[in-house]
Image (cartoon, grey):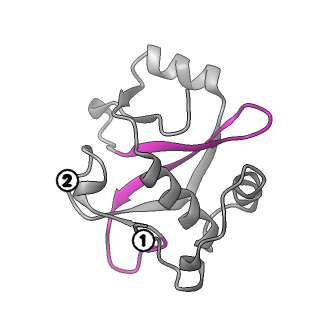
Amino acid sequence: MHVGFTFHDNPSFNRRHLWVIVSIAPNGKLVAFNITSHRDGIDESCVLNRSDHPWLKVKSVIAYQKGQLWDPVELQRALDSQIYQKNEVASEELVRRIAEGALASPRTKGELKDILIERGTKRPYAVQTKKCSPA
């Protein structure tokens, strides 16, 4: 597993969210956030469009409140058993935008923000406007 690795729920489970690994914690756990469809009233700290990743079909956002630390061994087991399926790698630009949006979002868990800062994510100018934007 590496930064930019993406995976999604098995379609037969009736959930279809793409997860993006944006950092690796010092203990080796993977910091990942999932993408969900845009709706009124949702956190817009990072808004994504179809052109941002081949998986995206509609305007979407990062569900920062659902960010998680994943154990890489457990994630590999879930991939091997097809609970999750590998998807196309996210671009460096997309990973940067998601990580910066995590620092901007009031819904990101403090532990995940601390890891991102420790691992070099810079607080973007966009933090002031609460939007992630392309470079």
The part of the image, by quadrant, that contains residue 23 is top right
Figure check: 86 above or below 51 = above
Q: Nearer the viewer, residue 127 or 120?
A: 120
Give, as a three-letter code, the residue at label 2. Answer: Lys
The part of the image, by quadrant, that contains residue 125 is bottom right
Looking at the image, which residue is at 24% across and 56% down? 51
Q: Earlier in the sequence, mark 1 or mark 2?
A: 2
Report crowding for label 1: few under 14, some 14 to 19, many 20 or more residues within 10 A (C-alpha).
some
Q: Gap between marks 1 and 2, in whole Å?
A: 19 Å
Give percent across and percent down for residue 46: 45, 67
Q: Secondary structure at mark 2?
A: loop
Query: Mark 1 sits on what residue?
Result: 133
Query: Mark 2 sits on what residue?
Result: 57
1 or 2: mark nearer the eye? 1
Most distant residue in the left direction: 57
The part of the image, by quadrant, that contains residue 77 is top right
Looking at the image, which residue is at 53% across and 80% down? 130
Give percent across and percent down for residue 117: 74, 58
Left-right relation of 92 to 110? left
For the C terminus, give its image quadrant.
bottom left
- For the magenta stretch, what is the residue range? 17-45
Left-right relation of 29 to 8? right
Figure check: 85 above or below 132 = above
Residue 33 within the segment the image draws in magenta: yes
Give percent across and percent down for residue 42: 42, 74
Residue 132 within the segment the image draws in magenta: no
Q: Secondary structure at mark 1?
A: loop
